[in-house]
Amino acid sequence: MKTANRKTTNKQKRIVIVGATGMVGGYALRYALEHLEVERVTVIGRRNVGLSHPKLNEVLHSDFTDCSSLVDVLSHQDAVVFCLGAYTGVVSDAELRRITVDYTIEFARVLHISSPNTVIAFLSGSGADPTEQSRISFARYKGKAENALSAAKFPQVYIFRPAYIYPVEPRKEPNFSYSLLRMIYPAFRRLFPNLVIRADDLAHSMVDVAIHGTREGIEKGRVLVFENRDIRNRVGLL
């Protein structure tokens, strides 16, 4: 006979968040920690998140080109919310490719060894090119990362392709374009509602999908892509 504790634990999920010191990953972490259906949140990153919580397990990992040491950490996990990334123009093209593609592929390799039945919610971006032929580096690299996850044979991969992500909380913007978009956000949102998404809404949607899955995922196949409009639909903004 199972104990009451075991029953509760079986209903709850163990979630890994990668990139929790970033804007979207930070909201995902806070939301997951508060979620009643989450038993444990393991954060993997190069810097401390600066939070203390009984559900939180923080693992510092400096080199994402080699995730072999994470085999035990990634064992017995139910879901991953992968938000690790970099802004175009802030890092070199080689670094952008390394962070976007190489880190994703290496993490997925070790995750599949440790927890092959894990569900993944992956933060991609609007315009990601699965043909990998785009002249825009960001689109080409995100497409390559998506393809790698699709080929990894996890039971469910949810790919999120947001357009402009509104930071919600004040921050130092990565470049002038983002500063400008933040300033004109109210008008931009009214004129082009399907080209914007709040960072907290995006994060909540990713965590909810990682925990519950979707009917579409069951009906339409193992890999499901959410464009910006789809994400807004999920959070009831249309």
Image (cartoon, rainbow, N blue to C red):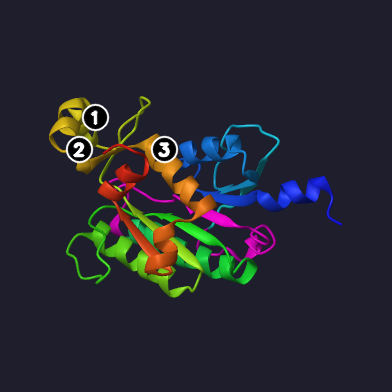
* Three-letter amino acid code at the position of disc 3: Met
Residue topped by disc 2: 193
- Spatial separation of the CA atoms under disc 2 and disc 3: 20 Å
* Three-letter amino acid code at the position of disc 2: Pro
Any part of residue 98 in sight: no
Q: Where does residue 64 sit, x and y in percent of width and height?
A: 51, 59
Q: Give the vertical position of 183 relative to 11 (above or below).
A: above
Residue 115 image label: none
Q: Main secondary structure of the magenta part?
A: loop
Q: Answer yes or no: do the residues labelled 1 and 2 have beta carbons within 8 Å?
A: no
Residue 23 image label: 3
Q: Secondary structure at mark 1?
A: helix
Residue topped by disc 1: 182
Quadrant assignment for the C terminus: top left
Please tell me how many numbered marks the rendered image carries: 3
Identify the residue at the far right of this view.
Answer: 1
Residue visible at 52% across and 52% down in the picture: 212
Q: Secondary structure at mark 3?
A: helix
Quadrant assignment for the N terminus: bottom right
- Spatial separation of the CA atoms under disc 1 and disc 3: 14 Å
